[in-house]
Image: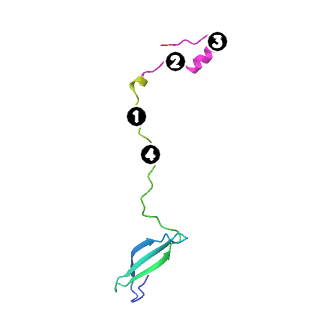
Amino acid sequence: MRCMVCGTGVILMNVVRDDTMAILGFEHHTFMCSECHYIDRRLVFTKHGRECDAEPLPLHTAPPIAPSSPIHDEQIITPGFFKRVLAKLRGRKADVQR
């Protein structure tokens, strides 16, 4: 863009999103001329929007996992499902190991 006073290129100094409008995408841009330092403020519509500078939403983290107790580390031996089914088919109870 060019300066309205001297025609030199302008520098974008500030962008403020306008949340008061019914339609999202309007921003107030402040430009300053690189030569005569004239300041120009314009209302600009950004068609595709802009990423906001807000903090990203926190991710949901899983709760901490507590270490298992040593009691559960012992393996409890029970007859397996397949062994019980075979025992029923044969007509006797499965042996329980300890």
Nearer to us in this view, 92 or 61? 61
| Mark 4 vs 3: CB contact within 8 A | no
Label 2: which secondary element: loop
Residue that carries the numbered disc 4 in the rendered image: 61
Q: Residue at x 61, y 14 (%)?
A: 87
Nearer to us in this view, 32 or 89? 32
Please name the amino acid that badge 2 sits on: Thr
Q: CA distance from mark 4 to mark 2?
A: 37 Å
Above or below 23: residue 88: above
If you read the primary sequence from the N terminus, does the residue marked by circle 1 or circle 4 appear first?
4
Residue that carries the numbered disc 2 in the rendered image: 78
Does the segment drawn in magenta span residue 87? yes
Write down the region rendered in magenta. 74-96
Label 3: which secondary element: helix
Residue that carries the numbered disc 3 in the rendered image: 90
Instruction: Please identify, in this view, whether the residue under mark 4 or under mark 2 is nearer the observer.
Output: 4
If you read the primary sequence from the N terminus, does the residue marked by circle 4 or circle 3 appear first?
4
- Residue 39: x percent and y percent? 38, 82
Nearer to us in this view, 87 or 31? 31
